[in-house]
């Protein structure tokens, strides 16, 4: 077997073995690029954002609330509403101290930036749930999810490399789309979807493997540090940044945050302040960090720090120094998650992820078409092939329907139901299971009928999400647009666009009355 032929075999099977898993990872991972926007929509109790806010004017509201709820905290974190993160959030950490009677750990609240009052919002998984699903899945232990998704990423990486090797005319194929040739149109589409975002695919799979290397390559640090406290200490040194200085244990009053605000703004070039991090509040060695959104690409913007006791700036040369290894890891993290991306680049990330899902989907359909068209190669395994073809419908179209059901459940489930966030996730998987069953329950009709039906359901599910929002919340599309809240309005507009795309796709599926196990063209030729 020649090298190129062996790569063809590797490309086929590395992509086929876990193609449904890769499709799930691409779809949920792409949604994760808009996790804040999804969070905003799934918390309709948060008022419509009326323009921008002066961070300085919000400081007194934050300090007033923290004096009531965070009196024993050893760390406080304040997030301000900026651009795609329109939340005025307070976080505080209470140490373990039985004598205080205060619940230890992290606590959080959202405040109305207009009034400073606490916002009580429904329990929801939000966009964070979809984001986490793409690398830990659901209903299984976190470590197992890491292993499974890492395996998927490794096979994806092999499929990419082998795909580059076997396509001698990779760039010529990129500019080829034989629309009139039904037997080649889907292969051309697979090639286009595989080549156009190829740099993104290589980056996203490699960086994904790097981010999970401490779970999947555990033998390396274990060999160095063992399995005891030394391993935990090594992890803490790598992943955590030590504070600029430790608490002294001596109580002392801290000056108001507004006193340090102007100095922080000046030090950061008058950029908007996005967060304030207070370490050891009420201690003599307390210090405050002011941070701003990064404007320097992959290089994270280091916050500026001040002594909370006297307001003097701390030496910048000792702040946030990273080893080369940490720098590489953080670069991979920023590349993978698009933490540095503005609106246009974030949409490019999202569209590249959707094209990745399309590449996987067309590859799965091409394989079933090839197997169906060659009875000798098929070896009579029609039943197995039929099962795969029907499952393709439920996976490729059923998953988007299930995600739409996740959004619907956010508004239809009772607000006070216990374990509400988990029931939102359960709704997603229940609906997905139904869509997986539907093609098998539709046995007397062609498979095309199942494709058409599910595409129409997906179209209706997404188009009516803005209607659901209008009926269940005051933060509907018209209100959001009138107040200039484009984070909120953008969600409804995106849902309408997705619904229209599914509707157009349903019109492209040919009608076939005779039962057939693969998508067929109007001319009768088989096509995936």
Image (cartoon, rainbow, N blue to C red):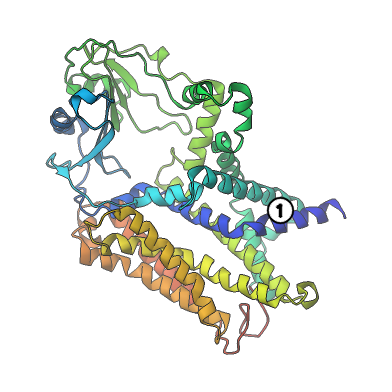
Residue shown at the point (31%, 29%) measured from the top left: 271
Question: Between residues 332 and 385, which one lies in front from this camera angle?
Answer: 385
User: Secondary structure beneath disc 1?
Assistant: helix
Displayed quadrant of residue 272: top left
Q: Residue 307 appears at what percent x and percent y? A: 26, 13
Q: Position of residue 411 (x, y in %)?
A: 27, 62
In the picture, measured across the screen, residue 285 lies left or right of residue 508, that is left
Per the image, the residue denoted by label 1 is 163
Q: Quadrant of the N terminus?
A: bottom right
Q: Is residue 483 left or right of residue 38?
A: left
Nearest to the observer: residue 30 or residue 480: 30
Residue at x 36%, y 66% (from the top left corner): 496
Q: Position of residue 483 (x, y in %)?
A: 20, 53
Residue drawn at the location 27% of the way across and 62% of the way down: 413
Quarter of the image that includes the C terminus: bottom right
Q: Is residue 134 left or right of residue 280?
A: right
Determine if residue 348 is in view.
no
Residue 509: x and y in percent read 54, 78
Q: How many neighbours does mark 1 have within 10 angstroms: few (below 14), some (14-19), or many (20 or more)?
A: many
Q: Residue at x 33, y 56 (%)?
A: 490
């Amino acid at each position: 077997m020649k090298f190129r032929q062996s790569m063809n075999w590797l490309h086929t099977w590395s992509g086929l073995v876990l193609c449904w898993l890769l499709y799930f990872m691409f779809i949920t991972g792409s949604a994760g690029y808009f996790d804040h926007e999804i969070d905003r929509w799934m918390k309709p109790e948060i008022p419509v954002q009326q323009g921008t806010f002066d961070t300085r004017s919000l400081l007194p509201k934050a300090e007033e609330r923290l004096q009531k709820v965070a009196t024993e905290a050893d760390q406080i974190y304040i997030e301000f509403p900026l651009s795609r993160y329109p939340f005025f959030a307070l976080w505080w950490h209470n140490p373990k101290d039985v004598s205080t009677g205060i619940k230890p750990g992290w606590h959080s609240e959202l405040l109305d930036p207009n009034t400073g009052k606490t916002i009580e919002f429904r329990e929801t998984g939000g966009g964070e749930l979809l984001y986490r699903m793409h690398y830990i899945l659901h209903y299984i232990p976190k470590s197992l999810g890491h292993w499974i998704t890492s395996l998927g990423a490794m096979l994806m990486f092999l499929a990419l490399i082998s795909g580059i090797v076997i396509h001698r005319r990779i760039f010529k194929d990129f500019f080829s789309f034989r629309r009139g040739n039904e037997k080649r149109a889907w292969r051309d589409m697979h090639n286009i979807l595989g080549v156009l975002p190829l740099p993104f695919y290589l980056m996203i799979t490699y960086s994904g493997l790097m981010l999970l290397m401490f779970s999947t390559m555990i033998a390396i640090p274990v060999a160095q540090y063992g399995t005891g406290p030394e391993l935990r200490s090594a992890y803490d040194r790598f992943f955590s940044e030590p504070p600029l200085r430790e608490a002294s244990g001596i109580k002392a009053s801290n000056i108001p945050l507004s006193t340090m605000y102007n100095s922080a703004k000046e030090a950061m070039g008058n950029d908007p302040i996005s967060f304030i991090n207070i370490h050891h509040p009420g201690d003599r060695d307390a210090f405050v960090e002011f941070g701003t959104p990064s404007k320097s690409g992959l290089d994270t913007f280091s916050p500026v720090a001040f002594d909370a006791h006297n307001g003097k700036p701390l030496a910048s040369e000792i702040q946030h120094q990273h080893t080369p290894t940490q720098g590489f890891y953080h670069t991979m993290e920023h590349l993978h998650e698009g933490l540095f991306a503005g609106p246009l680049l974030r949409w490019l990330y999202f569209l590249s992820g959707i094209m990745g899902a399309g590449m996987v989907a067309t590859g799965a359909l091409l394989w079933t078409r090839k197997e169906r068209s060659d009875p000798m190669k098929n070896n009579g395994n029609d039943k197995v092939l039929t099962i795969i073809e029907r499952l393709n419908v439920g996976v490729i179209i059923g998953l988007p329907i299930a995600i739409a059901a996740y959004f619907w459940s956010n508004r239809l489930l009772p607000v006070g139901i216990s374990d509400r966030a988990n029931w939102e996730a359960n709704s997603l998987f229940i609906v997905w299971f139904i869509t997986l069953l539907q093609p098998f329950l539709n046995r007397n009709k062609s498979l095309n009928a199942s494709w058409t039906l599910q595409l129409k359901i997906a179209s209706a599910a997404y188009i009516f999400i803005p209607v659901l929002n209008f009926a269940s919340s005051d933060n509907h599309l018209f209100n959001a647009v009138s107040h200039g809240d484009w984070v909120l309005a953008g969600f409804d507009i995106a849902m309408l666009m997705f619904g229209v795309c599914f509707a157009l796709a349903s019109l492209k599926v040919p009608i076939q009355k005779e039962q057939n196990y693969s998508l067929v063209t109007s001319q009768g030729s088989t096509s995936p």
